[in-house]
Image: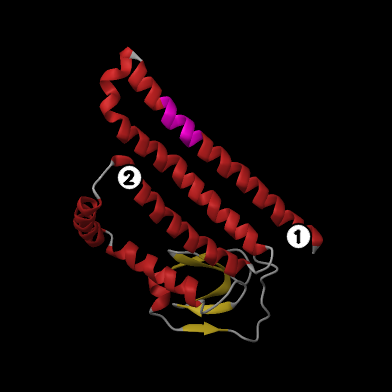
Amino acid sequence: MIGLSYDWSKQVKKDFVKLVIYLVMMVLSIFAVYHILTSTPLFQSYATYIAYINAIIVLTFGYKAVGTISNVIYHSVREASDHATASAIRTISKIGGVAVLLSLLTSVFGINPSAALTVGSFSGLVVGFATQTVLTHAVAGMFLVISRPFKHGDMVTVSGQTGFVKEVKLMHTILRTEDGKKEILIPSGTIIGATIVKNLEVRTRGDVIK
């Protein structure tokens, strides 16, 4: 038990180191771009694109930082809880982090909040129609993560597919067949509207499925 705790602690430390590296690289990149485009005569004509370049930098390193933060949360929770709970919290924290990152991008571009809201509403409407299926599965995945109708290691039958629950993700749930040779990915939207059968006679295999 001590060894397990130590392993998770090591992962948390590694994640923190990665997080610091990403943040430092992001800040240095922004300063470097500003200095080069404003101080070098050869590149001064491109100074008007600073905001766009900064947005790309923030999006790139910010997304990596969000992923690292969610891993920190996962490994921290994993010390005292099971994989399913830690994974659910990691998914929720990553979604929240992406939302914060998008808000940060708005400030980088210097967009007026009311204008951003108007443009965002229109864009959201267009994207919503174009990605209706994806959004349906994403929302359904959120409900699965929160309600947890089954957990890691449970043997379930969903949409005619039977297997042990390996992982519950935002877009789909992964089942592993009893012989361990196949993995079945079931879309979250399908699970929400389907009948779920849990086999209570089969011992959980959380120690086998990793």
Closest to the observer: 173 or 91? 91
Closest to the observer: 123 or 115? 115
Give the distance between the C-alpha atoms of the residues marked 2 and 1, in whole angstroms: 42 Å
Which residue corresponds to the image point at 35% horizontal and 39% vertical from the top-left? 55
Choose top left, top right, bottom left or bottom right for residue 77.
Answer: bottom right
Q: Name the residue under label 2.
A: 107
Query: Can residue 125 be seen in this snapshot?
Result: yes
Mark 1 residue crowding within 10 angstroms, few (<14) / some (14–19) / many (20+): few
Instruction: Farthest residue to the right: give it.
Output: 2
Apparent side of residue 199 relative to residue 44 in the rendered image (left or right): right
Nearer to us: label 2 or label 1 = 2
Which residue corresponds to the image point at 38% horizontal and 65% vertical from the top-left? 138
| Above or below for 184 versus 23 | below
Label tally: 2
Magenta stretch holds residue 97? no
Mark 2 residue crowding within 10 angstroms, few (<14) / some (14–19) / many (20+): some
Q: Which amino acid does label 2 sit on?
A: Ser
**Screen quadrant of the N terminus:** bottom right
Apparent side of residue 120 relative to residue 26 in the rendered image (left or right): left
Look at the image and give the residue range highlighted in magenta. Answer: 25-32
Q: Of helix, strand and loop, which one carries label 2?
A: helix
Query: Can residue 210 be seen in this snapshot?
Result: no
Q: What residue type is labelled 1?
A: Leu
Residue 156: percent from left, percent from top? 55, 79
Q: Of helix, strand and loop, which one carries label 1?
A: helix
Q: Name the residue under label 1.
A: 4
Residue 157: percent from left, percent from top? 51, 79
Which residue corresponds to the image point at 59% horizontal and 42% vertical from the top-left? 18
Counting residues from the start of the chain, the first of labels 2 and 1 encountered is: 1
Which residue corresponds to the image point at 47% horizontal and 34% vertical from the top-left? 27
Magenta stretch holds residue 30? yes
